[in-house]
Amino acid sequence: MSVFRRALAVAAVCAVLLPLSACGSGDDSGGSTDASGKVEGDITFQTWNLRANFKDYFEGVIAEFEKKYPDTHVKWIDQPAEGYADKISADAAGGTLPDVVNVSPDLVAPLAKAGLALDLDKAAAKYKKEYLAGAWASHRIPGMTGTYAFPWYLNTGPLFYNKSLFKEAGLDPDQPPKTYDDLFADALRMAKESDGKVATLANVPTIEDFGRYGVELMNKEGTAFAFNDAKGVKLLTKYKELYDAKALDPQALTATPESSGKKFLTEAVAMNPGSALDLDNFKKQAPNLYKNIGITDQITSTGHVNMYVMGVMVNSKTKHTPASVAFAHFVTDAEHQMSFAKKVAIFPSTAGSLDDPYFTKEDGTDETRVRIAAAKSLKNAVNYTPVLFSEQMKTALRNEVAKALQGKESPKAALDNAVKQCDTLLQQQG
Amino acid sequence: MRAVRTRELVLRYVLLLAVLALTAGPFLWQLSTSLKGPTEDIFSSPPKFLPSHPTLHNYERVADTIPVWDYALNSLKVATANVVTNCVGSALAGYALARLRYRGRRVTTLVFVLAMLVPVEGIIIAQFTTMRELGLNNTLIGVVLPGSIGAMNVLLMRNAFLNLPYEIEEAAYVDGANAWQRFLRIALPSVRGTVAVVAIFAFMGAWDDFLWPLIVLSDPSKFTLTIGLNYLHGTFANDERLVAAGTVIAVAPLIALFACLQRYFFRGVGEGAVKG
Amino acid sequence: MVSSTVTGVRRAESVGRVRRVRRQLPTSPWLFAAPGLLITGAFILYPFVSTLVNAFTDRRTLIPGEFVGLANFRELLHDDMFWIGLRNSTLYVLGVVPALVILPLLLALLVQKNIPGITFFRSAFYTPVVASIVVVGLIWVWLLDERGLINSLLETVGIGRVGFLSDQWLLLLSAMAVTVWKGLGYYMIIYLAALANVPRELHEAAAVDGAGAVRRFLTVTVPAVRSTMALVGALSSVAAFKVFSEVYLMAGPSGGPAGEDTTLVMLVQRTGTGLTGRVGYASAISVVVFVVTVALMLLVLRTDRRGES
């Protein structure tokens, strides 16, 4: 068969197939930004891995909302933990994004830039005062005006440590480290006393560690990264020292949250970040270890711990703007955040909620102690993760940090490279 | 002579057992973890191979956490549909490529070879967009369609048909049988073995897939088992025993299915080749 | 696949000459092939054509791209990660393919003879193929953990613990081992089918000549399954070059220490997916992967042909 005829055949195949997908890309009938109309219509609400444990809670909230607004119908869909960003990307690219979506700030940023997230400063300004100012601001995007999601639950983990390992190393099990300098000293001692068998940390420093160490992560305008300053280099240099002394676990370069949790459970690592829920997990999975667990605040040299913010955004293309905004507010209002917080170890982002006795009164159990400590530290916590810090940037930073720890690059060179890569990625985000 | 035979036989069994430990051992270790009770320390070292108080509690917990039967039913529907479409579609196409003479046969072969080489990870969003334009997103049909006639299976069938001696069909041709009749009555029954291979691959592929069903489906009531089991890796908690029980639930039906079909499968594989 | 494809086509042509008189409804061959062509065209080739187009744009997940010419390919040349990916995918082919061509053949010889209980063994050897790669990944990560089963055993016999999952090379090697482990049964079946073809008389004749097991293997078995070995070589090298899951699950999404275990397809996934994905750049990498796999097929095909003549 000649090349020409072959080409013709391929062209014929394409001609048959192309019309299939050429249609349907022009249906971008945008929704309105006016949320003041009648609350009615069928909307879809998507959460992120909450069905398995909180099915009854969400079905209750939805029933309550539908009772309050009889002309609405809310369809709840929940997505599993893995692949959430892929799922949202496909939906956003394909125009099938649900009306109300559970997001984190780093997911909101690209959606807002693509014009898919409703600006709540315009559509829902009246609710702004109900939330903690810092939480409301966490869904602002540098370089854009507006706020693109209601703040939902906050999370901050305590730090767990293994008291018996501390004791064996001659450290005071009741005086865990508070700042990074304390941590570095204790970790080196632990490594020395155990002959390199017990590491104190299981994870390489992340962008949040740089934040809590006091490094300026971005410039003031939010147009470029800046964590390669002297302070950033100092932190990484210190981590390199820990790595060489095996005070930072040798497998840290490939650690995942699961693997480092496992290391803590098998007592190969003395400290690990977690949440109040992990306590239950320890009780079940490693009863021997549970007796020796100490709980302390996150390590920080700035006086502020890090918090993670979950948000609820409204699809700007929704056909039922008033209902979607009303529902997003309904789920995140003080009453419902409070009742959610009582089901699971998360913290409300609504003003005043953290002063509830539930977050201030001890009852003698470990769970409550962890909860109260966390609520207290949350009051001045900072969301150190820059909104624009994408998955690709996390990988770039992680890989450069690893090169520095392995000694392939100096800490300074590694951070310079990481900043350069992140800046390039930032510009390409458009 | 007899001594040599016995020694050879013993050596064979020793080798077989060694390979068995290597291939089946890891699954048994997972099974053992899933049967360990809440009070047993699963991270102890040295490891304990057998659970000291075996319990099915973890399996009950999986069923409490997710509607595991609904998900399994969806997986079964998807996998069964995938088996039917792949067996029928690739047998037809394979037959055309191997036995029918027409213009453009080489190009069609080339299309399937190229399709096999496409890195799927790079085209998943484009696949989703196409599916949405066909209005098939969030349907089980949408889950099945892209893999419903795998290029690899088409080529496997083609090879099987090529290995058949031409004489058999020649006789039928002389008797006046047309292409459909020759395909259905003569060629297809002779490649049962390869059809069994395609069936198993198709079932496995559909049953094990995670990313594509996740992207196509939005409605939790349509989720397949692999997506459902992912809920066991909670955002809030992670329990090794529960995950182990989940993996056993995911693998067990496949092993059971294979155990039932294996006699036919292996015999079929042999038969198909002997005739070549 | 390709090797036998080509010999097959040649054979069909020679037979076709004899049967030139055959009358056929002109539409019928196309009807046979239509369902397969339609599905493959719409869901594999068409999306791939758009990937080809995207490779010349700066398209991102949510931002339609503009034509940028060869910019993506020029960027590839200066991207360290791309070269690391190319190196690892190539090493993967070199490491995995010889093992997957030879070991399953030996395994097939082991289970070929019908001795009591053999069907049980055959099935058991096939189980790793049946299990999903995610499950397999979970199992092996747990087995190879620093305090996992394998390290406990190594310590008991006095070798000491090995950082299978922390060293860049051991990680790649472990992932290869898992690929081989999962692939053994699959290729064993293909060989079993081929071995059934080897006439018993050949073996018997060789045995009468006094040839030992090793010599019989080399002089009778290997030549008889030569084209199957080429098929296995082609299939496994394409799969190995496109490796994703095993390395992703064992080395993590960022590709092991400092990303040194990243493979090309992992790089496609990392750069191209998510809301901030660079679809254009990832597509350019996909195109490279595609071109190399085509070249690999052609290479195996040529060595097979040369061996034949």
Image (cartoon, coloured by chain):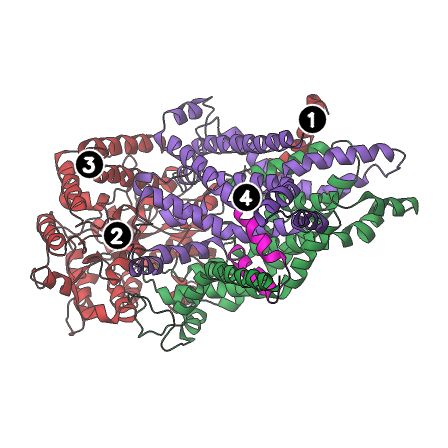
Mark seen at residue A6: 1
Secondary structure beneath disc 1? helix
Which of the 4 image quadrants contains residue A414? top left
Chain where mark 4 sits: C
Q: Which chain did the renderer colour red?
A: A
Amino acid type indicated by mark 1: Arg
Relative height, residue C78 to residue A117 (above, below)? above
Mark 1 or mark 4, whichever is nearer to me: 4
Q: Is residue A285 magenta?
A: no
Residue at 34% from the left image edge and 62% from the top image edge: B238
The part of the chain drawn in magenta is: C103-130
Amino acid type indicated by mark 2: Tyr
Mark 2 or mark 1, whichever is nearer to me: 1
* Residue under pointer 4: C101
Q: Which chain did the renderer colour purple?
A: C
* Residue under pointer 2: A308
Q: CA distance from mark 2 to mark 1?
A: 57 Å
* Residue under pointer 3: A227
Amino acid type indicated by mark 3: Phe
Relative height, residue C152 to residue B182 (above, below)? below
For marks 2 and 1 on the same chain, the one whose residue lies earlier in the sequence = 1
Q: Is residue C123 magenta?
A: yes
Q: CA distance from mark 4 to mark 3?
A: 50 Å
Q: Are marks 1 and 3 in contact (CB under 8 Å)?
A: no
Mark 3 or mark 2, whichever is nearer to me: 3
Q: CA distance from mark 1 to mark 4?
A: 34 Å
B151 or A387: nearer the eye?
B151
